[in-house]
């Protein structure tokens, strides 16, 4: 339908003039105030979507953030043009959180709203063309080109067309000139049509018409009449079997899905239609939920073990004094069951629960466990859901249907209004941090703030806590609860190191597999047990190179070499997505000696299939999980034993729980340890302990083989003895000594420019300005990052270290924002981009 843009209305004196501060979904630094037309006074509420005029543009999907009586001092407020919701779709606690995100992570509220709202809840507008109201083609006196006539003819029949439809009609790409000239001739007009992108799910249903429901005698009569038409009688009897005639008319009127009849191979489709034509049956459309209520029988949670009960009691005890507790429980200690018990506890006292997970792969497994207990109260939220599904989850939280949400980091945007518990599982995971685009938030910190704003408790869990979180426990801000034993009889796995350098000399390496690892894998296959292999890179090889002239293919847009992907014979950039076919010969010297260097998951899978042909191998990485259900498929194949070996990137290291895995192999530990970052050791420890933790989880003893060229690395001892406290003591001391988090807060500023020199100069200017504002010691850089060009932009980095206390932090951030703003005004650096990343990981 056309929206009514005919404001402003006549002002009337006896009503209050109200103004609304509106968040426009654009990167604007502030909110704009609009006047509420009197007759919308009751409709414009905080949290509803409105349409407003901004400059020359109508902006859709704006959110009302505040309502008051103060006209803006420095500009004339325009009227709100339209209200789209009768109830708020964003709650007040949500708005407070969004404001915090924008302030803390240095972005605009518009950017937060843009990231938060599922796209099906954003409006779209489309230009449509129709005949000019005063133009009558019948009495046409205009001279029209044949193409123009075609358009007019079509409009005369169709009332309105989209641009695409006109293009298709003329089978032309450049038809805009005809539209333009028709507008000039006042034969047509263009208007904007606004529509909700959300489309409800509709099913075709069928029911007995009211006539026959109400008078049973009629139905008897009908049976007699239909005797000569056995096919029709059959349809009717089948229908009545599905929906028996009931006293309660409403029950009859729900009918059944039409497919229940049409999918029955014994029923004739034409007889179904005949009964409809005769007015016996009728068809209707029904809007249904994409998440059918079908989990009526909820089960009780598993009975907790003594250790679990103790942990739970400790947690609840600590919650009496503290808002936040960290559950430090070794892999397989049964943390998930403790969470489930606590969720149940929270729901029983009437609040909502958010259960955050770092990875979709993990939700696939945990949802099955939660569904059994929470049934239809459980909602799931992640990026593999369609736009419409995500909008339904959003609405389902507002309406109260979903009380527990399991989801990945973006779930912190959901419209909770009555949270009582937030669980942040695998809290140490770097994937809780959003990289790009803004808001560059960390779902762990944001989850904590969300809980705080709604008076909820937060439980973080990990077998390998982040140094920052553990520090919060040590200083008494958070409570700490530990579980040091695996559930039941299960023991932590034995970890063995294989020195790949030595094995190479002894000719004991078969490509990337040591003889030891291969034998162990074979052994497991014989015993019908399963194996997980971890390699930290996807693709076949991180780069290829010519044996003759050492040519290495590089990305056209980024300063990285292209990875080789064998399954589609492509070279691919993992930073910008650029790809090209793998050349047959070296483009530099023509030799046919192109060799792949290094290895990724694809190569591991490939080689293993060659060396152990009887093994069923599957791979889980970004390349194999593009489709909606691929995670679920890979995991259930492995769970059911259809596959024996699971090869994967980080995805296989986190939280997964498979009963039959007795061996885990880490193919190349070295790149992980040698990563240039102050968190490298912490990360390596976490990764090794977590992936090892997938082995031997249920009674069967597990082993882990780590291949490394440097087995004397001290990190391995800590991993082998599961010695978190030594790692913590070592790390925290270094962090203190060098002034890293948690003793400071870091902000990374990245300066980007298409011109190398401009990027460098701008970074120098910005560093100088920042040093003047914040003090020299606080500002480090500028520095050229290891990957110095991405998407054709040259990069420079500045690191800022700030004292922890929050008053300083706020002031410093506004200084930084001011410095960036000033830099952008300088004529020398036109086209510059500056990104601030708060608490980068
Ligand atoms: P964590 O999350 O600490 O790594 P999980 O919660 O996945 O550990 O538990 C490890 C295994 O032990 C799982 O397979 C789980 O089903 C099982 N388990 C945990 N608690 C219980 C319980 N109370 N009763 C039966 N099985 C349990
Ligand atoms: Zn060459
Ligand atoms: Zn690239």
Image (cartoon, grey):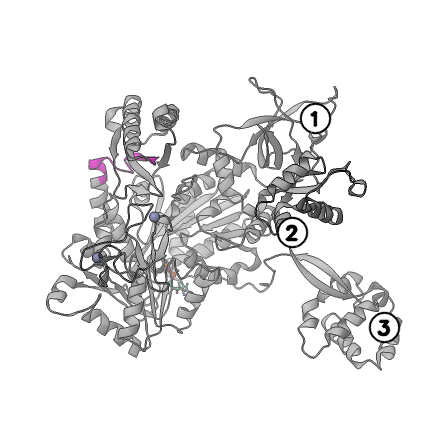
Considering depth in this image, is 473 or 756 the residue closer to the camera? Answer: 756
Q: What element carries label 2?
A: helix
Q: What stretch is highlighted in magenta?
A: 735-754
Mark 3 — residue?
219
Mark 2 to mark 1 CA distance (whole Å)? 39 Å
Residue under pointer 2: 169
Q: Which of 729 and 77 is in front in this view?
A: 77
Nearer the observer: mark 3 or 2; the answer is 2
How many angstroms separate mark 3 from mark 2 (CA)? 51 Å
Residue 107 spot, x, y in % from top left: 43, 34
Q: Nearer the viewer, residue 492 or 310?
A: 492
Which numbered circle lies on residue 677? none
View extreme (top): residue: 73
Residue 722 appears left or right of 69: left
Q: What element carries label 3?
A: helix
In the structure shown, which secondary structural element does the residue marked by tag 1 occupy? loop
Earlier sequence position, callout 3 versus callout 1:
1
Asked if residue 280 shows in the view, the reply is no
Query: Is 751 within the magenta?
Result: yes
Residue on which the image places disc 1: 8
Frontmost of labels 3 and 1 is: 1
Instruction: Look at the picture and state if 723 lies above or below 505.
Output: above
Residue 465 x, y percent position in the rendering: 31, 49
Marks 3 and 2: CB-CB under 8 Å? no
Side of 205 where 442 appears, left or right: left
Which mark is first along the chain, 1 or 2? 1
């Amino acid at each position: 339908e056309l929206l009514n843009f005919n404001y402003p209305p006549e002002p009337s004196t006896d009503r209050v003039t109200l103004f609304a501060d509106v968040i426009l979904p654009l990167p604007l630094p502030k909110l704009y105030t609009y006047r509420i037309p009197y007759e919308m006074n009751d409709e414009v509420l905080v949290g509803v979507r409105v349409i407003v005029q901004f400059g020359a543009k109508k902006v859709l999907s704006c959110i009302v953030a505040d309502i008051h009586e103060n006209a803006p001092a420095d500009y004339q407020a325009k009227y709100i043009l339209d209200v789209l919701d009768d109830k708020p779709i964003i709650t007040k606690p949500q708005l407070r959180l969004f404001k915090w995100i924008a302030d803390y992570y240095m972005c605009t509220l518009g950017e937060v709203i843009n990231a938060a709202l599922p796209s099906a809840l954003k409006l779209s507008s489309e230009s449509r063309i129709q005949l000019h109201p005063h133009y009558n083609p019948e009495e046409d006196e205009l001279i029209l080109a044949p193409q123009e006539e075609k358009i007019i003819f079509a409009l005369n029949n169709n009332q309105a067309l989209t641009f695409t439809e006109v293009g298709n009609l003329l089978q032309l790409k450049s038809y805009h000139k005809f539209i333009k000239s028709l507008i000039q001739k006042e034969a047509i007009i263009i208007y904007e049509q606004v529509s909700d992108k959300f489309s409800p799910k509709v099913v075709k249903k069928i029911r007995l018409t009211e006539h026959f429901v109400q008078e049973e005698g009629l139905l008897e009569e009908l049976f007699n009449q239909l005797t000569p038409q056995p096919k029709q009688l059959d349809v009717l009897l089948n229908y009545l079997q599905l929906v028996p005639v009931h006293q309660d008319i409403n029950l009859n009127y729900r009918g059944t899905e039409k497919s229940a009849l049409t999918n029955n191979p014994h029923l004739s489709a034409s007889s179904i239609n005949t009964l409809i034509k005769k007015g016996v049956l009728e068809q209707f459309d029904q809007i249904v939920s994409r998440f059918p209520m079908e989990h009526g029988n909820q089960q009780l949670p598993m009975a907790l073990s003594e250790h679990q009960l103790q942990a739970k009691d400790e947690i609840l005890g600590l919650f009496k004094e503290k808002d936040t507790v960290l559950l430090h429980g070794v892999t397989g200690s049964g943390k998930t069951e403790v969470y489930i018990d606590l969720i149940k506890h929270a729901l029983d006292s009437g609040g909502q629960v958010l259960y955050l997970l770092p990875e979709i792969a993990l939700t696939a497994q945990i949802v099955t466990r939660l569904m059994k207990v929470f049934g239809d109260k459980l909602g799931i939220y992640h990026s593999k859901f369609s736009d419409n599904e995500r909008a339904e989850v959003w609405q389902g939280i507002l309406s109260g249907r979903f009380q527990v949400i399991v989801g990945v980091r973006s779930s912190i945007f959901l419209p909770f209004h009555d949270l009582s518990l937030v669980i942040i599982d695998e809290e140490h995971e770097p994937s809780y941090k959003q990289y790009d685009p803004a808001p560059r938030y960390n779902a762990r910190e944001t989850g904590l703030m969300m809980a705080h704003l709604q008076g909820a408790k937060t439980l973080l869990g990990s077998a390998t806590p982040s140094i920052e979180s553990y520090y919060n426990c040590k200083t008494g801000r958070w409570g700490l609860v530990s579980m040091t034993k695996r559930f039941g009889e299960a023991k932590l796995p034995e970890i063995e190191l294989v020195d790949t350098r030595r094995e190479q000399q002894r000719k004991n390496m078969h490509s990337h597999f040591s003889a030891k690892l291969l034998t162990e894998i074979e052994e497991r296959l014989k015993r019908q047990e399963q194996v997980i292999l971890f390699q930290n890179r996807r693709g076949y090889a991180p780069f290829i190179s010519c044996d003759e002239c050492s040519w290495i293919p590089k990305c056209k847009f980024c300063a990285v070499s292209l990875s080789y992907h064998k399954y589609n014979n492509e070279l691919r950039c993992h930073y910008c997505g650029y790809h090209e076919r793998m050349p047959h010969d070296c483009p530099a010297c023509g030799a046919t000696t192109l060799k792949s260097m290094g290895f990724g998951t694809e190569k591991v899978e490939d080689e293993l299939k060659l060396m152990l042909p009887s093994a069923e191998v599957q791979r889980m990485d970004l390349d194999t999980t593009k489709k909606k259900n691929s995670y679920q498929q890979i995991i259930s194949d492995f769970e059911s034993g259809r596959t024996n070996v699971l090869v994967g990137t980080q995805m296989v290291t986190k939280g997964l729980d498979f009963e039959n895995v007795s061996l885990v192999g880490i193919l190349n530990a070295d790149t992980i340890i040698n990563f240039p970052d102050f968190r490298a050791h912490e990360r390596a420890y976490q990764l090794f302990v977590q992936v090892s933790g997938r082995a031997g989880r249920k009674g069967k003893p597990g082993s882990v083989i780590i291949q490394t060229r440097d087995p004397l690395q001290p990190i391995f001892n800590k991993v082998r003895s599961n010695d978190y406290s030594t790692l913590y003591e070592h790390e925290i001391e270094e962090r203190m000594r060098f002034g890293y988090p948690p003793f400071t807060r870091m902000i990374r500023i990245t300066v980007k420019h298409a011109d190398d020199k401009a990027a460098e100069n701008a970074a120098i200017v910005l560093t100088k300005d920042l040093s003047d504002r914040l003090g020299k010691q606080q500002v480090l850089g500028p520095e050229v990052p290891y990957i110095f060009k991405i998407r054709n932009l040259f990069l420079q980095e500045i690191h800022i270290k700030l004292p922890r206390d929050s008053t300083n932090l706020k002031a410093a951030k506004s200084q930084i924002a001011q410095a960036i703003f000033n830099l952008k005004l300088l004529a020398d650096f036109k086209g510059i981009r500056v990104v601030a990343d708060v608490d980068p990981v």
